[in-house]
Image: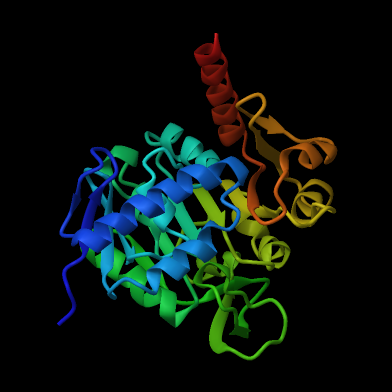
Amino acid sequence: MAQAPIQFDRASGALEGANLWERTAALALATGSKISSHFSHRGYIGCANLLRKTLPERNIAIRLNPDATFEFPYGDGYWSKLLNRAYHYEGELELLFRDSAGVDYTLLDCGANYGYWSVLVSSAPMGAHRAIAIEPSSQNFAKLKNNAEINGNRFELMKCAIGSGRGRARLSGTKHEAFSIAGNADGEDVPVIALDDLIEDGKVAASGKYLIKLDVEGVEIEAIKGGARLLATDSVILCEEHGNDPLHSVSRHILEKTPLTLIVYDPRSHRLEIVTELSILDRIKVSSHVGYNVFGTASAFWLDRVSALNAHASRRSQ
């Protein structure tokens, strides 16, 4: 019988249910995140995964807020940064989600992994929004399903990949956070749908407000092409601009090939800036091994929200 998960509360720092070695590992994982955060966590995942090999196989349940618990294998290199209470996972997304707590929107969590954003956005402090978590990997889906269950099955699950249209593809990769259907490598056979198929299949309405997190590892442009109808609603697409892409391919496609306004968080101004010239990304994308989220929207509603959010940021800095 599997051991009960270790419990960690991000608000208080309380760690419960861990033995002495597991407590020592938690301190090492948190300290490693604090130190490596000064250079974009370079090397952290590899070191954490080495430490994980010395730990018994069990889960850790992170209390993200009083109504959100996120569980994953203890010592996982990608998610253990959450043991560092100063760490904010994809802080620019959290900024938008928190500001939108009172908006009646649906989250489409494409490439959901273990369901971090679906867990958080569907929680009461974040507005208790409807969320659909879409994940193609059988390995990840089992952990995603577990997170849905421990949070009262309050968000929906779909096991498929997102692409330009319906079909099937091979999902491959060695890291759970980087599985991809790009290329023709051997791997798990998975179904593929387009974003607009969610409308066609009655999963979402043809009108409404949507935040669409698109974490699809190299298939962003194809996914955008398959979502023209959905992106014409009051929606924002939140997708990754790869740090190792000097051409800024995803942003270039949004800017030059779609009717969407391109937006990026600028750490210098602490604002969500409208991008008209891609050179701003040369300055923002300082680490080749990480991803940077960019936003695209054709919605006057969401553009007004961004303007108001920026105004709040300006007042806070005064």
Quadrant of the image occupied by residue 74 = bottom left
Q: Depth check: 193 or 115 in front?
A: 115
Residue shown at 60% from the left, 47% from the top? 40
Q: x, y (%) of residue 178?
A: 58, 69
Q: x, y (%) of residue 184?
A: 71, 86
**Residue at the top extreme of this rendering:** 318
* Residue 202 visible somewhere in the drawing: no
Residue shown at 75% from the left, 57% from the top? 244
Specify whether 117 is left or right of 269. Answer: left
Specify whether 20 is left or right of 290. Answer: left
Residue shown at 56% from the left, 70% from the top? 197
Q: Is residue 176 above or below residue 1?
A: above
Q: Depth check: 205 or 146 in front?
A: 146
Q: Depth check: 14 or 167 in front?
A: 14
Specify whether 167 is left or right of 277. Answer: left
The image quadrant where one finds the C terminus is top right
